[in-house]
Amino acid sequence: MLLADADGATMERQIRSDRDGTNRVGVRTMLLLAGLFAALNGLARRRRKTTEARAAEEAALRQDREAYLATIVEGSSDAILRATLDGEILTWNSGAQEMLGYTAEEMVGRSINEIVTPADADRQVELTRQIRLGNSVACSEGTRLHKDGTSVAVAMTFSPICQNGSGVVAMSCILRDISAARALEEALELRAFYDELTELPNRALLRDRLTHALERATRSGRFPAVILVDLDNFKAVNDSLGHGVGDSALVVVGARLRRAVRPMDTVARLGGDVFVVLVEDPEPGATIRAATRVLASLKAPTDVGGHTVVLRASAGIAVGRVGQGADELLGNADAAMYAAKAAGKGHWQVFAPEMHRAVLARLELTSELSGAVDRDELFVVYQPIVELCSGRILGAEALVRWQHPTHGLVSPLDFISIAEESGQIVDLGTFVLGQALEQLRRCQRDDPSFYLTVNVSPVQFRRPSFVRMVTTALRRAGVDPHRLVLEITETGLMTDVEANIVTLTELRGSGVRIAIDDFGTGYSSIAYLKRLPVDIVKIDKSLVDGVATEAGMWALVQAIFGLISAVGLETVAEGIEASAQVAHLEALGCTRGQGYHFARPLPGAELEGLVTASTSLPQPASPAATPPAAWLHAPPASA
Ligand code: C2E
Ligand code: MG
Ligand code: MG
């Protein structure tokens, strides 16, 4: 530009000197040329100025943009990195450091594969292949390794980086941490498919697995089996010890079931105290063995929340067949479980089609039982308890009966468990106690030493108001509490022994005596027998049955009597049907008994008559020889 200026001035000077000279021809032209030259020079100068400014501007803009991008990359919480197509890391932002624990200094120059989890290795190879082809891969989910060895769930975006003429030269990779979303998804899935309390699969997951197992079996021919496990008298644990202890007990049950079966079997909790074991692909006999193990695993006493709880369960087994759905199979196992309960609890039963009818009948009885007291359908009969050597009536056991409007007489064996499950046992028990105390008052008029025993369900016994209910009833009836004996089964007493001892002590403090019923059928613990504040032990009929015929049973009963008398308790033998049994029992030191040999359960008025007449049993034409009216004793347990 300086050169152009200098040239222009020189040229003008030259033109002026020419004008002063002789050769004035073409001056005009020269001037014109000089002007033109100056103009062109100015134009070139201006153009040069604009290009330079634009270049500077662009450079500034580029710098701006780079700074801006760098700010975004550095400020991003996403991990943003660049790598060669061979996987060598070129850049590593602070988001990557935050997410994966490594600094840029540690990672630049290392392979991108070092942050790929083994599970994602194959996918990384595929991603790189796509990048080489020039394709972007957006939002692929995977996991990446943190420096501390844990894996981080990420959403990944891979993009090719191209260079003019050279094609794809590198890749950029953006990783977004989706651990929180994953954790939420997992938590939701856990809620949807797992039981919150026991963390076992729930009904939905069990149904799903069962459905698939049945589908597979249709092809393989090996059908799955289910074992439906229902705890016996669990309501009593909840009612007496509270739901907190009940919940802890359920957790223990879940863990024990898990240990009792193969790792491949599913143990699910359907809700409440109902668990299901799904035995897939069972070997012949494996399901029965599993059910036996499952029930045995529950028997050992458990300490929960400072209480000793003995849990028992009944189980129903059903095996799948062609065309059967999960619900049908579970329904069959349920019916089998009810059959097991009806047959005395604590056992398993295999499903048979007629069991459904029994379940329906049971449901019907449950609804009909409510209101049975109000409709005067329940009444109490009394079975004499006699002195074995003389046949003198010492007392009687009150036994409830239900005169059903259409089924006729229903056995307590069929409706007591229904009443316990539905909670109706509380009203029913109060009714029986009231009736029995009235009867006791009447019988005592003739024999002040006469006593009555009343059966108490563990469900009633564990209610906080039970002792108050008994003492109030005694006061109302105006009878000596010492003439009342409450019978509770040994199985009922062995659940939460410590709390039971407190209740038993309170009851005995009010003068009432306590008998352990059906001794020898349940959890017979002589150690507990020493600790329990009880007065009488009733030896179960199953032991009495064999005493005159089986040497082994005789020896067992002898040992039991020895232990019981050593503890200072009185014994009463139940279910005596033959005189030979009386002789053997007497020889063993048992002084009291009851059974059809002496008398069947009688209506109150008849009992009163016998007491008034100081009758000795059996009489010459004993009720054992000539059965009394059908309603006095219960029909078979199939009503
Ligand atoms: P349990 O308390 O052991 O009563 C004895 C059962 O054996 C009675 O059956 C009685 O009729 C029966 N029995 C007595 N002697 C003989 C005999 O020589 N041979 C045979 N084969 N049986 C005999 P029942 O009345 O059917 O009662 C069955 C069970 O129902 C009772 O067994 C008791 O556990 C329960 N139960 C009856 N009444 C009540 C009640 O009011 N409340 C409660 N919670 N349970 C009751
Ligand atoms: Mg009894
Ligand atoms: Mg009994």
Image (cartoon, rainbow, N blue to C red):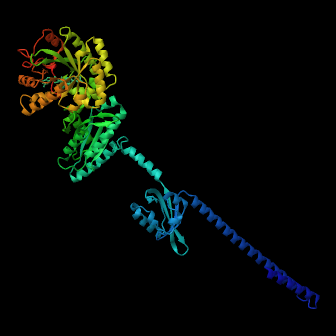
Tell me the quadrant of ligand 1. top left
The picture places residue 391, in percent across and down from the top left corner, at 10, 16
Answer above or below: position of 355 versus 267.
above
Q: In the picture provided, is 83 more to the left or to the right than 461? A: right
Report the number of numbered marks: 0
Quarter placement of the N terminus: bottom right
Q: In the picture provided, is 589 more to the left or to the right than 492? A: left
**Towards the viewer: 205 or 8:** 205
Residue 328 shows in this picture: no
Residue closest to the far front: 566
Residue 348 shows in this picture: yes
**Towards the viewer: 26 or 295:** 295
**Towards the viewer: 401 or 98:** 98
The picture places residue 417, in percent across and down from the top left corner, at 24, 28
- Quadrant in the picture for residue 331: top left
- Residue drawn 26% across the image and 52% down it: 216
Answer above or below: position of 542 versus 317.
above
**Towards the viewer: 221 or 21:** 221
Answer above or below: position of 72 versus 298.
below
The picture places residue 530, in percent across and down from the top left corner, at 22, 28
